Structures are given as structure tokens and as C-alpha cells.
Image (tube, rainbow, N blue to C red):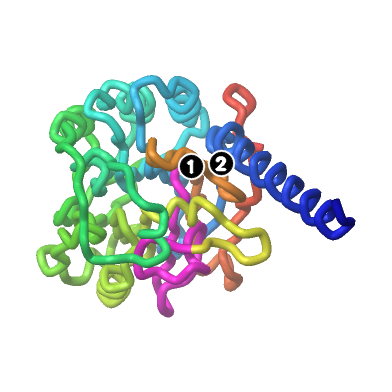
Amino acid sequence: MSDVVRNLSRIALGTTAVGAATLAYAAGFERTHWTLRQATLPVLAEGARPLRVLHISDLHMMPGQKSKQRWVAALDELNPDLVVNTGDNLAHKQAVPAVVRALGPLLNRPGVFVFGSNDYYAPKPKNPARYLFPSDKRFHGIPLPWRDLRAAMLEHGWHDLTHTRTLFTVDGRPIAAAGVDDPHLKRDRYDEIAGKPDRQATLRLGVTHSPEPRVLDRFAEDGYDLVLAGHTHGGQLRIPGYGAIVTNCQLDRSRARGSSRWGAHTWLHVSAGLGTSPYAPVRFACPPEASLLTLVPRTTSANPALDATRGARFNPGAGVR
């Protein structure tokens, strides 16, 4: 065997080994490396006290995912003032009890929610290339019991923001909130909630599952302070130094996770979410996350938001690190 052949064989074996190790890490470790993102956003009315918002998205829950359920339930230790759930909670027709267990004590706090495509339909196996070359075609799985999950959330006092505007209080402070149905399925009908939110509100909050620019533009035009979304999984597979490869929507890659401005007034926060499709159970350079957002008055900071994203772990019983 020539030296050239030997060298090529070594390279091939090395590449295969690296690929296998990367896949093992992405599937066996990182996808359950539960992470807390923290950000401080200057979005509140002048003179308002800070408001702590816990943003949960894309659980994609399977009944047997006990570790995820325990970790999410323990987020109650963060003492959020408000919980916002931006959808895709389900990944199995029997997952509603698991989601309710995961949300557990958080359901006793003020909360709002909208649903995503994987609340309505079960996931199906897909060719990964479809994410690189998106299409308007949708292939739905079996219907999921989203109405049962909605009933549980409503029973605990959470507000369904689907095509609804509402005004409610959190710790004695008025919050104006509105949301749309999932734009990824083209179910959004923003005209049903169009108009300026209450100017007297401490916070004007928009909620959507998929952060489609057409929806974000409407929230910004109406003067919302903050819009929360999920859906992107942060790209799910990220290349160090490059970032997300795709966002699975029309949002640009640079906003696939974390906080950014959307226009002169509105802030956007996109959660990378806590789950994956059972048919693509991998994450790389993009650990599953929930977000604790500390909202402060606009006048307290002229600087961009502080988004402390980088792998901050939350250990139940130890508080925020």
C-alpha cells in the first residue's frame, strides 16, 4: 500500500471518528444540557419596578422525558413575575400530562401562551434537506390534544393570547398583551388584534410562536415594547463562529436566538427552546434553554440589552448562577 493511500485512509478514519464523536455529543449530551439564558431588556415605562419574565418555548415533550419535566418545574425557584409560553409544547398524543407536570408550580403564577404547529399536529420524519431548502408545503402528523392542554392552562388562570388582546395585572402593574396563532402554519390573523395597546400599561407585550417578520413588523408598528417568540430552536445545529445555519422561517440567522431590536422602539426575544423533534434528537453548539428576562425602564439604560446567554446553568436548589 502506497504512502498516499495510507494517509488517505488515516484521514478517512479520523473524519469518521470525529463525525461519530460529534453526533454522540449532540444526541447524547447537549440535547439534555438544560441551560438558562438571562437578559436585561430596557422596555418598561418610566419609573416602573423591574419585572421578571420567564420565557418557555418548544418543549416538544414526550411522556418519558422526566429530566426535562423536573428541570422545567424547578424554574419556579426563580420567582418570575410572569410566565410566557410560546408554543410547541407537545410531541406525542399522550404528552399533555407530562407538560402539565413540567409546568407544575409555574401554572400558579401569572401566565400567557400561544400555540405552535407541534401543539396541533404530531411530528413526522422529514428529510433534513427540507430545512436547507424550505418549501411552502406542509406535511402534518396526527392531530394532537391541544385543547386538553389549553383547558389545563386556562383552569390555572393563564391567558390564551391567540388572536386576543387583553389587559391584566402582575404585582399590581397593568400589562397589555396580544398574540397571534402560529405564522409558520399561516394561521396568523393580525388584523384581529391590530391597534395601539393601552398607553398606560407598564408593559406592552406581543407573543407569537414563529417570529415571522411580517408579524413582527405589525407588532412594532402598533407600538409594542417587547415581542417573544420561539420556533427556531436557535438553529438547533450551529457552527461555531458562524451561528445558525437556518431559522426554519423568514427571520435572519443573526436573530435565531436571544435579544435584538426590531425597529426603533420594539425589542424581540427569540428562545432556542427546550426540545427537538423525536425524529431529529440532536443539538450542537445550541443547548436547550429557557430564558429569564429582567425588564427595566427604558430610561435606566441607553445601551443595548445585556444578554447573558453563554451556557449559564441553572441548578435547582441553587438559584440563578
Residue 133 position in % (x across, y down): 37, 67
Callout 2 environment at 10 Å: few (<14), some (14 to 19), or many (20+)?
A: many
> Which residue, as the protein is rendered here, is positioned at the far front?
1
Residue at 89% x, 56% y is 3
Q: Answer with left or right where residue 257 lies relative to residue 142.
A: right
Q: Secondary structure at mark 2?
A: strand
Residue at 26% x, 48% y is 116
State if disc 2 and disc 1 touch (CB < 8 Å): yes
Q: Identify the mark at residue 36; answer none if there is no mark.
A: 2
Where are the magenta residues, as a range?
Answer: 246-274
Q: Amino acid at mark 1?
A: Ala
Vertical relation: 36 (above or below) 239: above
Q: Identify the mark at residue 270; answer none if there is no mark.
A: none
Vertical relation: 185 (above or below) 140: below
Residue 286 position in % (x across, y down): 56, 49
- Provide the residue designation for mark 1: 290
Q: Quadrant of residue 30?
A: top right
Q: Is residue 110 magenta?
A: no
Residue 153 position in % (x across, y down): 23, 32
Q: Answer with left or right where residue 5 lies relative to residue 86.
A: right
